[in-house]
Amino acid sequence: MRRAVRCSLAAMEAVFSIVLACGCKKTSAPQQAPAPVAVESAKPIDHLAPGELAEGTEKAFGLLLPKGMHVNSAFGNEVAATGNDVPYGPLVDYLHARVRGGSLKRNSFQAIFDQVKVPGAPDRVYSIFVRPRGTGSFVSMVDETPAEPPPAADQDERMRQVGLTKSGKLLDPTHLH
């Protein structure tokens, strides 16, 4: 764009010089081409606010952990992760922005997210414990989703499970507690 404007200006100057050299009378002042406008480069939209943590690559139960957090262990219904250079306060803010529902109890020693859901596993319920650890943080995430109840048995089966007949009599009268 700038090169085209420069070439255009150079061509206009050459034409003007030729007209003057020919002895033509100057009837009006030459018009200047508008100065080229500098185009500002667009800033990327994904800038982080001061102290804001960027998303990492490791997950805990479908929750994407921030950059610098590493999963140390995952056993059944619990995942533990640490981040040696991930500050406690920004980590709590990061998690708070990504979990849904539940409650948050926070002080300078720990933060507890209770009965929250995460986008990667919206049908599950979690508790998340965050503690400062040196210059970093420790996170423990526990799946608190209640177990599915066994399928309901028919009335006769339920009576038999508690030691009674269909009519409510003891199945084994010798087995009294």
Image (tube, grey):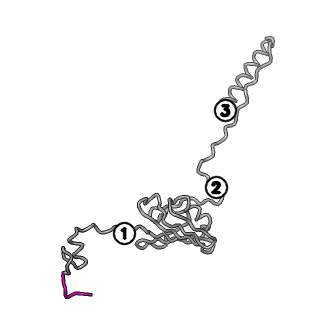
Distance from Cα at disc 2 to Cα at disc 1: 40 Å
Disc 2 residue type (three-letter): Ala
- Marks 2 and 1 close (CB-CB < 8 Å): no
Residue indicated by mark 3: 3
x and y, in percent, of residue 110 in the image = 59, 72
Disc 1 residue type (three-letter): Ala
The kind of secondary structure element at disc 3 is helix
The kind of secondary structure element at disc 2 is loop
Residue indicated by mark 1: 147
Residue indicated by mark 2: 49
> Which residues, given as a range, are shown in magenta?
171-177
Distance from Cα at disc 3 to Cα at disc 1: 70 Å
In the depicted view, which residue is nearer to us: 114 or 68? 114
Q: Nearer the viewer, mark 2 or mark 3?
A: 2
x and y, in percent, of residue 100 in the image = 50, 59
x and y, in percent, of residue 138 in the image = 55, 72
x and y, in percent, of residue 80 in the image = 49, 72
Q: Earlier in the sequence, mark 2 or mark 1?
A: 2
Point out the image quarter for the N terminus.
Answer: top right
Q: Residues within 10 Å of mark 3 (few under 14, many from 20)?
A: few
Q: Is residue 108 above or below residue 49?
A: below
